Image (spheres, rainbow, N blue to C red):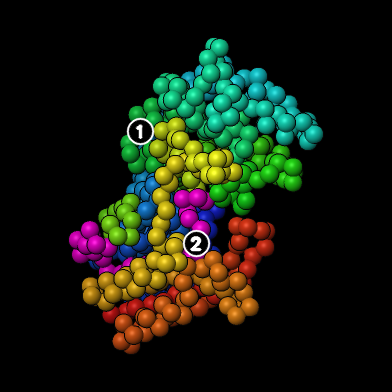
Amino acid sequence: MKNEFPILNYPGSKRNLLNFIDEYTTSHIPKGKAFFDIFAGSGAVSYFYKDKFKVYANDSEQYSSVILNALLKFQPKGKLSVLLEEINHFSELNKQELLSVFNKWVDKEQELISSYKYEDIEQFYLSFPNVWKGNIVINNMEITIETLRKFPLYSLFTSYYSGNYFGVLQSVEIDSIRYAIEKGNFSVETKNMLLSALFYAMKEAVFSKDGHMAQPLGINNNLDRLFKRRSVSISEKFVLKVEDFYSDSFLTEDKGNKVFNYTFDELLFNNKDIFDEVGFIYADPPYTDMQYSRYFHLLNTLVDYQYPEMTVYRGSLSRGLYTENRYQSPLSQKSKAIHYHKQLFDFCKEKQIGLAFSFAYPFDPANQQTSRYVLNIFDLIEYGNNVFNGNFQYYTQDYNHSNNRNSNSKKVLEYLLLYTP
């Protein structure tokens, strides 16, 4: 499909449901008005409508804002070869500095991976000097998070995530490409594109379930996957995605697109003027109590690049190596979700703005687990019928939904609740 440009393996992505959504929404979007994707996530729906309408997109997560800006605002300019030369120049500067410290580790890792030494790889990573283990020593000086913050080279992923989420060489490549993005003479739009390409490369290499980044897998039970993932070149995957952004397949249409990085409260109650140009809202909120900042906390860490403190729980670091103070969305909290979505319905009714509301729910809720879902979809349907006074319908599509906890999919109904004033 031409109107598709994937970056991440995103929980709840509508990439495979775009035709279903389009069938019931497009005819209700007023000409000359903006289509507003208010929980835009990885941007699948926003990008799909890019060449048809002026698209506004919002998400509370920083990494999502980066992707949305890349998908909706980036315009390929200049020669791709010149861009890649500049990236390579700065990347090599940082890489060589890191290799001067970690070269023996990189060489040993590549030897173990190329020769499939299953019996040695776990001990190798257990002994790697991560900063949170307190065992990095450079020039006879123990390195801490504080000292890392003062270093001119970029070493966050090498010192935090080598041996767990990524290999040592992969982490060196991530740090070095990030250094190049920061030091190169690039526009904001180009930086967002480059960061998104790096997100893609990280997704292709990360040693975790289904490309999500909630926590690394255990090595012992996933050795085949470990060697497969560690063999992925971050640099090669990054370049391939940058080339995609410069290819004819990337949609460059921009009818006045805008991207926002607001929470639900900030968007609906503190920035109402945004909606003056909006003719239709598409809402695809979280379905379960799993936080998206947990799935992709590494991406926010990459963007901020601030050598964060690590979250300690009951005296120990979390397995996911989460950072302190990551955002917790109330939309993923059972006590608040239904209240917020009712507010959205009321807002659309007051403003007379059309609404399409997506929500995946178990196909057979009487016999399928619903405890992780933030609301009962039938409660929201009932509310829609009462609020919208006959201008409300809903449609369903059978769908097999991926489950981040196991390799199986579960059968759900994809609900599309539609208000047409």
Q: Examine the rendered structure and indicate whether residue 252 appears above or below residue 309.
A: below
Q: Secondary structure at mark 2?
A: loop
Q: Is residue 405 visible?
A: yes
**Type of amino acid under label 1:** Phe
The quadrant in which residue 114 appears is top right
Q: Is residue 249 left or right of residue 124?
A: left
The answer to whether one can see residue 233 in this image is no
The quarter of the picture where the C terminus appears is bottom left
Which residue was labeled with disc 2?
Answer: 289
In this rendering, the answer to whether 255 lies above or below 183 is: below
**Image spot of residue 373 (x, y percent):** 51, 68
Residue at 49% x, 30% y: name it.
156
Q: Residue furthest top?
A: 139
Coordinates of residue 178 in the picture (x, y in percent): 45, 32
Query: What segment is highlighted magenta in the picture?
Result: 268-295
Say which element carries label 1: loop
Amino acid on which disc 2 is placed: Asp
Residue 122: % across, % down: 72, 34
* For the residues bearing labels 1 and 2, Cβ distance under 8 angstroms: no
- Residue at 63% x, 68% y is 410
Comparing 256 with 339, the one in front is 339
Label 1, on which residue? 186
Q: Nearer the viewer, residue 132 or 197?
A: 132
